[in-house]
Amino acid sequence: MPSSRILWTISAILSLTFAVLLVLSWQAATRQEQPENQLVSEADIDRALNEYAKRGNIPEGDPIYRVPTGFYLQSLDFKDATSVHVAGYIWQRFQAKLPEDFTKWASSCEQDKTPFIFPEQIEAEAGIEPELRYEAAGDAGRVCGWYFEVTLRQPFDYRKYPFDTETVWLRMWTRDLLPNVVLVPDLAAYPHGTDGEKIFGIGQRMVLGSWLKSNTYFSYTTTPFDTTFGILGTDELSEALELNFNFVLKRQLVDAMVEHLLGILVIMILLFATMLVVSRDEHKAQRHGFNTAMVLGACSALFFVVLISHIQLRAQFSGTNVVYLEMYYYLLYLLLMGATINTYYFSEEANRATSILHFRDNLIPKLLYWPFIFAFALCISVIMLL
């Protein structure tokens, strides 16, 4: 049988190997692919509108009226796991050749209501409607600009926390639900370009807290309706073409690492130190003050620390699925339970069922402690992050 030193060396090599693979999986999780549905040119817009018309959403022969729309966001704040508050400017360009309901905007921006709505809006800040801030007229039509503050309800995917990337989008409809009036990105309003490598339409001094700017882009989404709303004059199901302004955010890892992962690592080290004092050698046990009650008390104290920290993490994502970092708390529960069971049976007299625990003074559980932790972490990283 190899010596204890050789066995500890093998354990250290396995732990280091799994730890390196774990870090590599974290690096792979931070890579982000560019969305495929970005609208970065007039050709992209034409292609999307043609596909929309081919699906029978616009009566044959009817023209498509375009309303160029732009966004400039000045602040963003996550209220809870599913609500986000957004403030900034929206402008729209109205030409003289528009349906009757929209012609009024080409002559004056001073109207009772805005020509757009946010379908995901749950409240306007302090009950205030978007406020008209400026208007200008030119050969390309009349431009109306509004300042807005809204809170939106959106489904975010936090499963990869703290390696998650979230997209906050502003979905817009035309207020009158006219099928042949569509909102299009005002690409000309962003002279520095709107391709996938540029961040546009975002205030340079926007404070994002624990988030980093990653990307912005325009896109279209379609929402099928199972109703005609009583006004579309058709019994067939229709769908709305919605203009989205997407703001992609990447989470800063430092906050989550310090707030949760550092504490988890410290608890793992303390639990390992507790396991190291487990011994049937009377001299060692007396020197370290080992007894079964001491280990059970230490595990109980660590359990309440882990539980409180886990509850605090869960409160951030109430109503959502289990997040990646949360799996480390389940790992800690498993380790605490394993350490308790190991100490209890080790303190009993050796028999065939518990002989592995008594091998070389409880050496096997101590050798497997860190390899098991890093192997477990690597498995959940591969399953949940990649």
Image: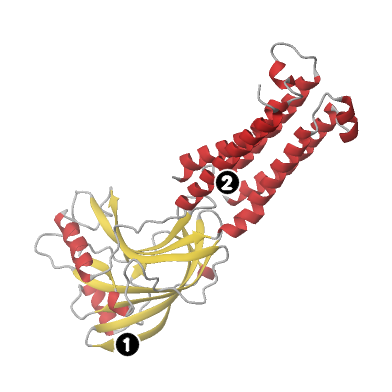
Looking at the image, which residue is at 54% across and 46% down? 20
Residues packed near mark 2 inside 10 Å, few (<14), some (14 to 19) or many (20 plus)? many
Q: Name the foreground residue: 329 vs 356.
A: 356
In the picture, the quarter occupied by the C terminus is top left
| Location of mark 1 (residue) | 136
Quarter-of-image position of residue 323:
top right
| In the image, farthest residue toward the left | 61
Name the side, left or right, on which 344 lies relative to 76.
right
Residues packed near mark 1 inside 10 Å, few (<14), some (14 to 19) or many (20 plus)? few
- The x and y percentages for residue 362 are 74, 25
The amino acid beneath tag 1 is Ala
Looking at the image, which residue is at 66% across and 25% down? 2
- The x and y percentages for residue 292 are 83, 27
In the picture, the quarter occupied by the N terminus is top right
| In the image, farthest residue toward the top | 352
Looking at the image, which residue is at 85% across and 25% down? 281
Q: Name the foreground residue: 316 vs 292.
A: 292
Q: Say which mark, if any, is on residue 325.
A: 2
- The x and y percentages for residue 151 are 49, 63
Quarter-of-image position of residue 284:
top right
Q: Which of marks 1 and 2 is nearer the N terminus?
A: 1
Looking at the image, which residue is at 66% across and 54% down? 259
SS category of the residue bearing label 2:
loop
Name the side, left or right, on which 259 lies relative to 247.
right
Q: Name the foreground residue: 33 vs 233.
A: 33
- The x and y percentages for residue 304 are 75, 40
Name the side, left or right, on which 146 lies relative to 240.
right
Q: Is residue 203 visible?
A: yes
Q: Note whether 302 is above or below 236 in the view shown.
A: above
Q: Say which mark, if any, is on residue 267.
A: none
